[in-house]
Each structure stands twice: as structure tokens, then as C-alpha cells.
Amino acid sequence: ANLGGEVLFAPEPIHNLKKHEKVICSVGFTSDGKTLFSSSDDGTVLFWEVEEGNLQKEIVREKSDWVLANLSQDDKLLFTASADKSIKVWDANTGKLLYKPLKGHSERIDGFVVSPDGSTLISGSRDQTVKVWQLETNGARVIHSLSEHQGYVYALAVSPNERTLATGGTDKKMLIWELPINNDKFLKFLALKHPSFIKALAFSSDGKMLVSGCGDKTIYVWDTKTWNLRYNLEGHSGAIWSLAISPDNRILASGSNDLTIKVWNLSTGTLKTTLTGHTGIITTLAFSPDNQTLASGSDDKTIKIWQIV
């Protein structure tokens, strides 16, 4: 129950989804929260019905491994980035490939975000670049290629107002970029050093905080007005691999290679609960639009769905 603003998850997941044959790369919800999509190293993107946990459809079967998936806000377009170094745009309903694959990276894509309006795709790669793609009627083109990182780019996040981009990876730097209005130059205006690699980044939905998950087992919470560190969260015994913030900004979930998910109060930094059950690294996390459900994907090949009680 939601007693005095407390957020508590039931200790057992309501569903344990097993269908993928390899590590889960990404999970996400449709805008109504009724459907979950998941992508995997097995090359597939699956859609699940959340309430019953039933598989609805397999929409994509890639020949390549390592598939990251994103859905447009209107749920019509499915975007995938994979180890074949390309990005693809699919009809999320039929699974039809809409354009020829978008090529530009020379190594696998590890980070991939879509702007809220679906017009801009941003990809980060092991080729050390971040590419910004403009979606057009017959495909997409690279409008910016950012090559400030000196290592793999693992993590990307775009602020809710689409004005700020954060990027991170193996060079232990979180770079903050001002997104250009009408396609001017990108401005890198800040590099925030971390003690270890950065695997996950997330903006709060009000844009006031940016959270980074680091290989030093620590989560850093930054104030986006001053770019000062608000606080850091310690408690995991392994590197942070995934982060998700509930749409109402009340809770932060973190996944680690210590096989646990930790749920924190975002405004105070207090640890609320630790969710256990996965037998592999927690590679991806996502909250439902109504804040009540958390999905976790792992390299144990399963997806778990957790519910607030």
C-alpha cells in the first residue's frame, strides 16, 4: 500500500517471463502500460501482455546478436540497434522493416535512445562516437557525429525537454551536451569525471536530476541546474549496469552485477528495498507509465515483473 508516501514492492515478482534464449538487452512498456517489449542477444524482440504475463508476438528476428529496442511514444514505430552496427525502423504492429538499415557506426552499438517525439535517434558505439540521426520520410541521416569520448560509449540519456544529452562509457567521463536548436552545432559544455566506467544514465522526468550508474558500485545523482553532485548511493556490491526512474520521480531502481535490484527514494536517497531472484546481471530496467510496475531483464535470460503493493 502507499502509506504516507512509502513505496514498497512485493518481494516476489508477479511474472517470471522465460522465452528468450540469451541475455535480455532491453525492456520497455507501451504508452498504456499494458504491453511490455523485450529484446535479447538471441536477435528477437518480443511483446508480452503485462497483466497475465502471456507472450503476444515475436516481432523481430534479427540475424545479428545484441539487439537494443525502443518504441516511439505513439507505439507505432519500433527502433532496434544491433551488433551488426546498424539501426532499423520497424512497424511495431506488423514487424515490417520500414527503411533500409541505417548504417554509420563501425563497431557495435551499445547505447541507443529515441527522442520523445520520435524524430531523432541517438546512438553510442564501441567506435567511440555518438551519432545523432534525423528521421525522414524515407529513412534517416546522421546530422551530428560526436567524437569526444576516448572509449566505448555505453550509456545515453536525453532530458525530457530534449535540450540536454548525457553520454558515458569506458573513459570514465560523463559528457553533457547542449542539444542544438534547428541543427546548429552540438556544444559539449561539461565533462564530469567518474571513478570507473559508466554503464547507465537516466534523467528524472522533471529534468532536475541526472543519475549515473558506475563500475565502482556507486550511483551518482546530479543536479542539472548546477551540475553539482547531490548525493551518491552506496549499497550495491557490484558494478551498476542499469537504472530506471519512475515517471512520478519518486523512486529510482538500480540493477547490478551483484544480481540484485535496489529501489531508492529519489528525493532523499534512502534505500527502500532490495529485490532478489535473478541469477545473472540485471542488464535493463523499466517502469510502467503508472509507476506501479517495474520490469527487469537479466543475463539469466529472464524478465521479471515486480509490482508495488
Image (cartoon, rainbow, N blue to C red):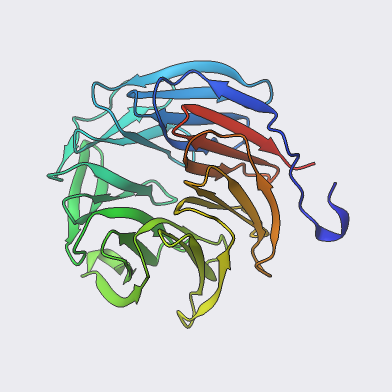
Residue 9 visible at all: yes
Q: In the image shown, does 78 or 287 lie closer to the viewer?
A: 287
Q: Residue at x 47, y 46 (%)?
A: 257
- Counting labels gives 0
Q: Which residue in the rendered view is the most extreme toward the front? A: 237
Q: In the picture provided, is 199 more to the left or to the right than 235?
A: left
Q: In the picture provided, is 185 more to the left or to the right than 89?
A: left
Q: Is residue 156 above or below residue 1?
A: below
Q: In the image shown, does 229 or 167 lie closer to the viewer?
A: 229
Residue 72 at x, y percent in the picture: 43, 40
* Quadrant of the image occupied by residue 148: bottom left
Q: Residue at x 53, y 42 (%)?
A: 259
Q: Residue at x 35, y 64 (%)?
A: 196
Q: Is residue 18 above or below residue 226?
A: above
Q: In the image shown, does 185 or 232 lie closer to the viewer?
A: 232
Q: Is residue 193 above or below residue 248?
A: below
* Quadrant of the image occupied by residue 42: top left
Residue 54 at x, y percent in the picture: 60, 17
Placement of the C terminus among the 4 image quadrants: top right
